[in-house]
Amino acid sequence: MYTFTVNGQPVTAQEDKKLMHFLRDDLGLTGTKDGCDQGACGACTVLINGKASKSCLFTLAKVDGKEITTVEGITQRQKDVFAYAFAKTGAVQCGYCVPGFVVSALGFLGKKPDPTEEEIRKGVRSNICRCTGYVKIIEGIQLAAKMLREETPIPDETSDGKLGHDMKRVDAVEKTLGTGIYVDDITVPGMLYASAVRSAYPRARVVKINKAAALADPECVAVFTAADVPGNNKIGHLEFISDWDVMIPEGDITRYVGDAICLVVAKSKASLARIKALVDIEYEELTSILSCEAGLADGAPKLHERGNLLSHEHLIRGNVAEKLAASAHVVTEHYSVPINEHAFMEPECAIAKPEGDGILLYSAGQSIYDEQREVARMLGLEKEQVHVQGQLVGGGFGGKEDMSVQHHASLAAYLLQQPVKVLFSREESLMVHPKRHGMEMDFTTGCDEEGNLTAMKAVIYADTGAYASLGGPVLQRACTHAAGPYKYQDIDIEGFAVYTNNPPCGAFRGFGVCQTAFAIENNLNLLAQKVGISQWEIRWRNAVGYGDTLPNGQLVSKNAALKEALLNVKEDYEKATTAGISCFFKNSGIGVGLPDVGRCIVSVEGGKIHLRTSAACIGQGMATVITQIACETLDIAPELIVAEAPDTARTPNSGTTTASRQSLFTGEACRRACSQLRVDLDMGYGMADLEGREYYGEYSAKTDPLVNDKKNPVSHAGYGYAAEVVTLDDKGKLDKVVAAYDVGQVVNPRACEGQIEGGIVMGMGYALTENFALEDGYVKARYANLGLLDATKVPEIAIRFVQAEGIHEGLAYGVKGVGELATIPTAPAIAAAYLAYDGHLRPTLPISDTPYQKRRK
C-alpha cells in the first residue's frame, strides 16, 4: 500500500502504477495531460514536494509519503493570476501543453519570484509546445510572476471584440487551468477499451490470425478482424480514392507497419497490452518498396491495384526551353527533404457509444463531417446515423485530417453496443498517422543579366507512403507554388506522388509548399550571387504586386502586399552582419476547381446569439475568430455570443480545417448570417422578439481546375504573403527572426502574432533539428528524439503586419488565412543565412554543418 497526499488530501493506493495514470484514471484529475508517456513533453508536469516533475516518470512507490500538487490543486489566487496572464498575453492556442507550463512555472517561481527571461526559458525547457513558439508563454509567465510578486488584483477588463482589437480567447481560461475537455478526459459508464494489433512488417502477407488465446483471457471482450466490418473495409479522406484498409484481411498484404490487423477490445485499459500480445499472427514477409525510385521501377510489385503512381501533375506555361537557353544565368540543383512528423501535443483519442440505431462519436479531428462520412461508409449506415461531436483538439497541423482512432472506436461500439474508447500511445501515433511528404526535387531557374527571372523547370518526386491520404492535393500545391510569388510566366513543373511501404504522408502545415519553397528560394539566392545583387534585391525585382500575374496565371489582387512585406524587412536585412531572407505565399481555400464551402447558422437562444459552425479549432482560435466577426457585424459585446462546438446534429458542414481556409470561408459565412440578423435588429426587433430564429450563411468559392486553357485562371480564392529575415551571430547561431506578414485584415493581433511565432519555430525545427527516424520502413522515432525545439533554443522573434489598401473590402472583411503561411518561409530563410555565413549551399533538410546539427560526413 502507498500513501501520499494529492492537493492536500491523503490518498492510498494498493497497486503500483505510474503517477500520471493514477491521477488521471483513478482520481479524475485530468488537468495533468498525457502527451507522450515518455518524459519528453512535460504535459504531465506536477509538483512533487514543491518541485516540478513529470508524473509519467514516477511510480506510486516513488512518491510514497510525498506531497503531490496538480494544476487543480494550486491556490485560487494562482489560478486567477495565470488564467488572466495567459489569456491577456495570448499564451494559449491548442492548450494541451498549458497546464504543464503553469505548474512548471510555479515550481521555479517559489524560489525565483522575479525571474529573468533567460531563467524562465530554462525553467520551462522540459515543456514542449508545438503551437505558440513559446514567445507568448514566456510573456504570460513574466506577467503572472509580476502580479504574484506585487499582489496585483486581477484587472476588470473587457473588449468590444471588433476586428483588429485584442480579445482574450474564448477558451483561454479552461485551457490554462486544465478544465477544458479533450476526448481522453471523458469517461463513460460501462466504457470498454480497444486497441489494434499492427503489422510486424512494412510489407507482408497476413496468412493467419490466431485469436483463441486472446479470447480466452477473462479481460478480453472481443477480437475483431476485417471480416467483422459490416460495411466497406476501405476508407479514405478522399472519398473517390478510399484505399485505406480498416483492417488487413487474412490473405491480403500489409502496406506499412501501422496497418491494423485486428482490433482487441478489453474490459480495462491496463489489460490491453497483455491481450494484444496473445494474438498470434502468421506472416509471409515480402520485399518492401521504400523509395519513389523503387516504386516506379520496372517490375515493381503493385502496392495498390492501380499501381504505385498515386498522382502525376504537369504544369506548363510558355516556352521554358527557349527562355532558359536565352537566359544570362541558369542554376540547376537537387534538393532533398525528409518525411517529417507533426508532433502535436495530444495523442489521438476517440470514444464511441450506441445512440438510437447508430452511434455517437466523440472526436478530436479536423472535420466532424469527414469522420461521419467515413464511419458511415465503414458501418454501412446512413450518414445521419453517425452523430459526431467535436471536443477540444490538442493540436493538429494537418495530422488529424485522416481517420486514426475514430473508425475503430465506432466499429467496436456498434458491434458490441457498448461505449468504447480508443487511445493511441505516442508510439502508435508516431507509427500510424500521415506525415509531411519527403521529396526529391530537381530545380532549374534562369534570369537575365539584371536578375529578372525568366523561366524555371522542376521535377518533383513525393513519397506518399502506404495510402493516398491527401497525397494528390499536396502534390498539386507543391507544384502550383513551386515557382514562388514572382512575375515570370514560363514554367515547366512536373510532379509524381508515389506509393511506398513507408508511413502514409498527407496534410502537414504548408501542404507541400514548405518543400518546394525551400528549393526555389535557394535557387534564387544562387542566381543573386551570379548577378552580383543581394538576396533581398532579387526578390524585390521579381515580387508580384497588384495587377501582376502569378506563375500559375492568376492575377494578383488589390489586397496583395508582398512588396510591402519586403520593404518592411529591408533595413533589418541590410543592417545585419549575416542574414538570409525568404518571401513566399500560400493559398487560402482548397481551390483548383474543387467544391469549397463555408457554412454558418446564427441562432438566437436564451437571449444570446449562438454561432454554429463545424469548423474545427486545432489551436488557431476559430471560436474567437467568428466571435469577433460577429461582434464587427452586429456591433454587440462578445459576452452576448456563444460559439458552439462542432456537432453534426447542430452545426452545418463548414468543411475541413485545412488549406488555411476557415477564417476566410466560415468567417464569410458567419458574416453573411450575422448580416441577416443585423437587419432585424436595425428594424427594432429585440432579442426577446427574435428568440428561436435562425439565420443561415454560406460562402462558396469559384475557382478553376489546375489544368485549364484560360489566360488568367483563378486557382484559389485568395493568397497571403510574407517576408522573413533570419540573422546569425558570429558563432553561426540564430540571433533574430524578423517577419512581415500580409494576412489582410488582422482579426486579433496578439493571437495572430502567436500563430505566426509558432509557425516560425516549427519551421526552425524543420530546418535545423527535426528528424523522423525511419529505417527500412520501421519507425524508430520517439517523441524524445524528434529534435523538437524547446524554449531555450528560440531566438528573438519580431512579427509585423503589413497591409495593402482596401483590406476591409471583399470576403470576411478582408481576412486571410495564416496557419500554413506561417511556417513556409522560415527554412529557406535559415538556409539563406547560412549561405551568407560561409558561402555553402545546404540543399537538404535538416541542414547540415550548423551548431544545431552534427557535421554530416
Image (cartoon, rainbow, N blue to C red):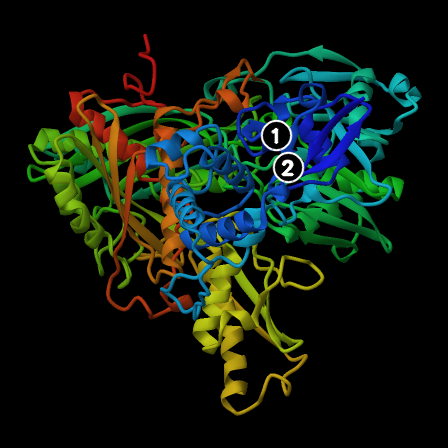
Q: Amino acid at mark 2?
A: Glu
Instruction: Specify which label sits upstream in the sequence, 1 or 2.
Output: 2
| Residue 640 percent location from the top left of the image | 56, 73
Image quadrant in which you'd find residue 299:
top right
Q: Residues within 10 Å of mark 1 (few under 14, many from 20)?
A: many
Q: Is residue 811 left or right of residue 237?
A: left
Q: Is residue 159 above or below residue 88?
A: below
Name which residue lies at 6% across and 32% down: 532
- Position of residue 494 relative to residue 801, above or below, is above
Residue in front for this viewpoint, 621 or 443: 621
Q: Within the image, what quadrant is residue 646 found in?
A: bottom right
Q: Residue at x 75, y 34 (%)?
A: 10
Residue 13 position, x and y percent, is 79, 27
Are circles 1 and 2 on residues that touch, CB within 8 Å? yes
Query: How far is the residue under mark 1 from the one under mark 2?
Result: 7 Å
**Residue tagged by mark 1?**
429
Q: Nearer the viewer, residue 152 or 740?
A: 152
**Label 2 crowd (10 A; few <14 / some 14-19 / many >=20):** many
User: Which amino acid is tagged 1?
Assistant: Ser
The reply to whether residue 7 is visible in this rendering is yes
Say which mark, if any, is on residue 348. Answer: 2
Secondary structure under tag 1 reads: helix
Q: Position of residue 645 (x, y in %)?
A: 63, 58
Q: How many marks?
A: 2
Quarter location, residue 66: top right
Side (left or right) of 515 relative to 772: left
Quadrant of image for the C terminus? top left
User: x, y (%) of residue 846?
Assistant: 36, 23
